[in-house]
Image (spheres, rainbow, N blue to C red):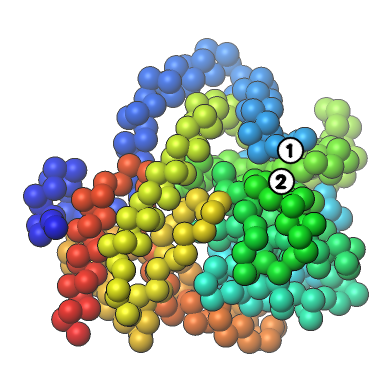
Amino acid sequence: MIKDLRSMPAWRSMDTIPILDLKAQYQSLQADIDRAVARVLASGQFILGPEVQAFEEEVAAYLGVRHAVAVNSGTDALVISLRSLGVGAGDEVITTPFSFFATAEAVSLVGARPVFVDVELDSFNLDPSKVTAAITPRTKAILPVHLFGRPAAMGAIVEVAQAHGLAVLEDCAQAFGARYCPPCENCQCTAATQQTLANQFTGAIGSMGAFSFFPTKNLGAYGDGGLITTNDDDLAERSRMLRVHGSRQRYHHEMIGYNSRLDSLQAAILRVKLPHIDRWNQERRRVAQTYHQALAGLEMIVTPRIVPGHVFHQYTIRVLDGQRDALAAYLKSAGISSMVYYPIPQDHCPMYKGQSPPNPVSDRLANEVLSLPIWPELSDATIEYIAATIRQFFQRL
């Protein structure tokens, strides 16, 4: 067991273990990325164009969808998807309170109202057993989030949506490369649905999927970027129009749209990275498994379940008995970064506060969750040091 952070060569010149370190990934791909950037610079074409089209084709083939539409952010992917689905003023969209604000914000940006339904305690994802009770005549869609890289209970969600004629938009911002792998106790859907959806990638299950390529994501660009996925030709065409000011043909604007085009530089970088995503996600699972073993037996800690298909965008523990903030402070004192995702559920944000029934599980998680450092190249030795520091904290209580 490592006793002294400064004895670790990887951190000899640093005071802190970061929550995420992207340098090793770049160094491993530097030559290929530099060539891709030079190729784009030499081409003189920096918005959409051949690089973006090639990336769309390659990522659609990887995810197993008919269409991939590249846009300039994950938030725009949500907004444009909602617009493409016809969601607008007076409509309601059922979603989770326990997510980054962009999920609900996108619903509000198209003029609809987010309806917050509580989450499952173990998965942090939308609880499908509570969705039906929230459906009204104004409900247009269900917007589950595959939080921290764990797929939501899509079988049950899809069945509810089909029974009520609703669209399903998957928020896959944290779940690139995650697969839905039923059966599990959290998804009480029929065997037929399980068989139909088994092993599909997130973003290929619902009516549409929305991805983010923010640099911290499992598949991250070197700036903003996003992606819309669908198997519906009409939805794809509408999304392509909306990303370029509502036009199919230049200067022929058929609807109010957006300036939401992916940069060619980002597409070229993502094309270099895409072939490595499975390996990186497997390494994230290795990190999660190492944490799981190193933290075993701590009664004040609940570690995330390692279920098939989970790609661990974050490794998020629950810290019980009100000790979360004290543990975070102790880790900081030992040179270990941690983050709270998310301290304020969306339904408690000022613009939504008081508009929804209580969501006690989400509220509880906001006071318990703590995300620990994770990236594919994180060493077992560093994980052991982090776990030893956590154990030391609880031994002091």
Please provide percent x and percent y for residue 144.
Answer: 68, 62
Please provide percent x and percent y for residue 59.
Answer: 64, 33
Q: Is residue 222 among the parts visible in the rendering?
A: no
* Residue beneath the point at 52% across and 29% down: 275
Q: Nearer the viewer, residue 207 or 236?
A: 207
In the image, 374: left or right of 48?
left
Residues under numbered marks 2 and 1 in contact, where contact means CB atoms less than 8 Å apart: yes
Q: Amino acid at mark 1?
A: Val
Q: Which secondary structure lies at badge 2? A: loop
On residue 204, which mark appears?
2
Classify 10 Å Cα crowding around label 1: few (below 14), some (14-19), many (20 and above): many
* Residue beneath the point at 78% across and 64% down: 190
Q: Quadrant of the C terminus?
A: bottom left
In the image, 393: left or right of 146?
left
Please provide percent x and percent y for residue 223.
Answer: 50, 39
| Residue at the farthest top position | 42
On residue 10, which mark appears?
none
* Residue beneath the point at 43% across and 20% down: 32
| Mark 2 or mark 1: whose residue is earlier in sequence | 1
* Residue beneath the point at 50% across and 50% down: 311
Q: Which residue is mark 1?
A: 65
Q: Amino acid at mark 2?
A: Ala
Q: Is residue 218 among the parts visible in the rendering?
A: yes
Residue 182 falls in which quadrant of the image? bottom right
Determine the CA span between mark 2 and mark 1: 6 Å
Classify 10 Å Cα crowding around label 2: few (below 14), some (14-19), many (20 and above): many
